[in-house]
Amino acid sequence: MKVARDQRPVRANASEGLSIAVELVSGCGHAFWPRPGRRISARPADTFADLAAAIDAAFGRRDLEHPRMFVLPGEVEVSWTDWCDGPAFTGTADGRTCRLEILRPGDSFTYLFDLSRDWSHLCRVRASGGRGCAR
């Protein structure tokens, strides 16, 4: 995955992958404005765990032991409790196997990092992907 630190869109077409705009909305009880943001380039075959790693790297996170979760359109939740081998939370799709191919242009979803401090990110898909994710 590629990260662009400026606000210019990273061009990606359906055959090449996804362009996802990510904005840090809030964390530790504070709302941010203007919102710091990054553009992430990814392939539809990448997993949500891969996307989380790219977002965390783009925002300079070092404390990666915290639980994280995505909330997708239709209230689909994607999670995992441990970076390498823990299970997904009950009732959620596993972020290590669920692929970004389920995302569509225009989709907005949330990435939550460190659920106790609620670092919330608004993510918006700017280029298209494919389909499918099982719980």
Image: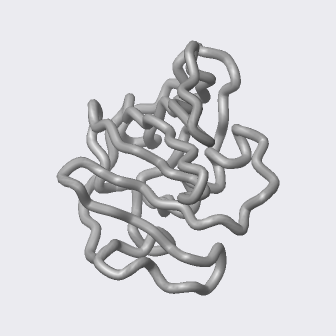
Q: Which quadrant: the C terminus?
A: bottom left
Residue at the limit of the structure toward the front, as seen here:
29
Q: Residue at x 66, y 35 (%)?
A: 3
- With respect to residue 133, does 123 lie above or below? above
Pinpoint residue 93: horizontal percent, then vertical percent. Answer: 35, 72
Question: Foreground: 13 or 69?
Answer: 69
Residue 100, picture quadrant: bottom left
Pinpoint residue 118: horizontal percent, then vertical percent. Answer: 54, 49
Q: Residue at x 50, y 51 (%)?
A: 112
Pinpoint residue 35: horizontal percent, then vertical percent. Answer: 57, 20
Left or right, 63 with reference to 55 = right
Pinpoint residue 82: horizontal percent, then vertical percent. Answer: 62, 77
Q: Residue at x 39, y 33 (%)?
A: 124
Question: Foreground: 101 or 89?
Answer: 89
Residue 5, picture quadrant: top right
Residue 134, picture quadrant: bottom left
Left or right, 39 with reference to 109 = right
Left or right, 26 with reference to 59 = left
